[in-house]
Image (cartoon, rainbow, N blue to C red):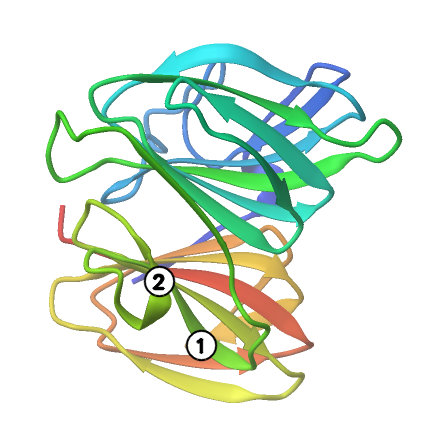
Amino acid sequence: MIYLRKAQDRGHANHGWLDSYHTFSFANYYDPQFMGFSALRVINEDVIAAGQGFGTHPHKDMEILTYVLSGVIEHQDSMGNKEQIPAGEFQIMSAGTGVQHSEYNGSSSEPLHLYQIWIIPDKAGIEPRYEQRRFDEVHGRQLVLSPDAREGSLKVFQDMTLSRWALGAAEQQRVEVAAGRHIWIQVVKGTISVNGQQATTSDALAIQDEPVLELVADSDAEILLFDLPPV
């Protein structure tokens, strides 16, 4: 089964300084059909105006992943981290027993475009931690998150992996899916087809009971592929 989550069907909130699209129920957007997917709880695509951002606020018992598409984030947290996260970098923070942080657009003139993704951890009460990384530009698959930080990936406290795929126009790839696993594909840019189902920039595909995925790039494309545990 493959379900297409069209970009324009997501929840949307425009606060002037923040233009945000919510894949799953978040803040004032509520849809009981879209409360999450396996361990995924939040996928927000945000554009934050120059010099604006989120003031200090708390989190607890959540793995929070940020992927910067353009611009730069200024991050500061109660663990003592004060970092800049430029375009192309991933950041993960385990909120665990509790952490406070702020996130601002580090530019005074350019907007900031990012994905923020919340993953439910496989256990509560983790000691808070912070990591960020720029991965080398590669063609094909690149492992970004894994529970054992293998292949230079960032660690996540959940039985899942996240791979970033960069595909050239007309390129085909085959992905085998272990029995019972759930797959979420978020299209960062371009257009792809998965087992004949087409999705384009900011669309997503929720996939279950598909043992093999045939990926075909209809244009140069980048996707995030989450391999997630059974519900």
Mark 1 Cα within 10 Å, few/some/many (few <14, many 20+)?
Answer: some
For label 2, the residue is 153
In the foreground, 197 or 224: 224
Give the distance between the C-alpha atoms of the residues marked 1 and 2, in whole angstroms. Answer: 12 Å
Q: Is residue 26 left or right of residue 146?
A: right
Q: Can residue 178 be seen in this view?
A: yes
Q: Name the residue under label 1.
A: 141
Question: Residue 62, image x and y in percent?
Answer: 28, 30
Q: Position of residue 74 (x, y in %)?
A: 63, 30
In-image side of 207 versus 78 (left or right): left
Q: Which amino acid does label 1 sit on?
A: Arg
**x, y (%) of residue 134?**
54, 58
- Identified at 38% across, 85% down, the residue is 174
Q: Is residue 183 above or below residue 66?
A: below
Does residue 196 sit above or below 44 in this rendering? below
The quarter of the displayed image where residue 221 is located? bottom right
The answer to whether residue 162 is above or below residue 23 is below
Residue beneath the point at 56% across and 38% down: 9
Q: Which residue is drawn at 32% across and 25% down?
A: 32
Q: Nearer the viewer, residue 40 or 154?
A: 154
Quarter of the figure that contains the N terminus: bottom left
Q: Which of marks 1 and 2 is in front?
A: 2
Amino acid type for the residue under numbered disc 2: Ser
User: In the current view of this chain or complex, which residue is farthest to the front?
Assistant: 80
Left or right of 17: which side holds 8?
A: left
Mark carried by residue 28: none
In which image quadrant can residue 104 be found?
top right
How packed mark 2 is, by other alpha carbons closer than 10 Å (few <14, some 14-19, many 20 or more), is: some
Q: Give the secondary structure at mark 2.
A: loop
